[in-house]
Amino acid sequence: MNGLAERVAVSLPKSVVERLEKVRIHLRINRSKLFLFALLTYLDRIIEPGDRKLEKTYREIEGTDKELLAHFSDSYKNLPEYAD
């Protein structure tokens, strides 16, 4: 962090706060650090406007899946049927 901070007030269900407290105590960090870590982790996983990295990754996975299915589909034709 660059040293600048802004206070933010949020209301959370008591059950969530209790879970957060358990994690915070276990990790031995204060609430601010726990919230910062959690929010940054979440923000790193979602697509932000203009961020196409995740979208590109999904397209690559889809392409790889199709290649693997095409490559191995003939191998599975000779397997016996599954019996319950």
Image (cartoon, rainbow, N blue to C red):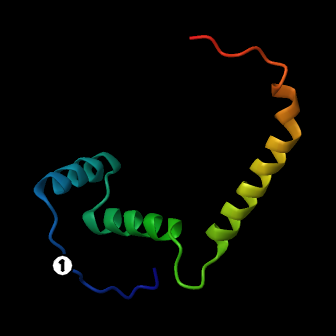
Task: Count how many numbered circles sit on residues in the image.
Answer: 1
Q: Residue at x 38, y 63 (%)?
A: 38
Horizontal arrangement in the rendering, residue 27 relative to residue 45 (left or right): left
Which sits in the foreground, 81 or 50? 81
Horizontal arrangement in the rendering, residue 62 relative to residue 22 (left or right): right
Residue 24 location (% of width, % of height): 28, 53
- Asked if 30 appears above or below 81 in the picture, the reply is below
Residue 43 location (% of width, % of height): 46, 71
In this figure, which residue is indicated by the disc labeled 1? 9
- Asked if 28 appears above or below 71 in the picture, the reply is below
Location of the C terminus (image quadrant): top right
Q: Quadrant of residue 1?
A: bottom left
Residue 8 location (% of width, % of height): 23, 81
Q: Quadrant of residue 63?
A: bottom right
- Asked if 21 appears above or below 76 in the picture, the reply is below
Amino acid under label 1?
Answer: Ala
Q: Residue at x 14, y 70 (%)?
A: 11
Which sits in the foreground, 78 or 8? 78
At mark 1, the secondary structure is: loop
Q: Residue at x 75, y 48 (%)?
A: 65
Q: Residue furthest left?
A: 14
Q: Tag 1: Cα neighbours inside 10 Å, few (<14), some, or many (≥20)?
A: few
Q: Residue at x 46, y 85 (%)?
A: 2
Which sits in the foreground, 12 or 4? 12
Horizontal arrangement in the rendering, residue 26 relative to residue 11 (left or right): right
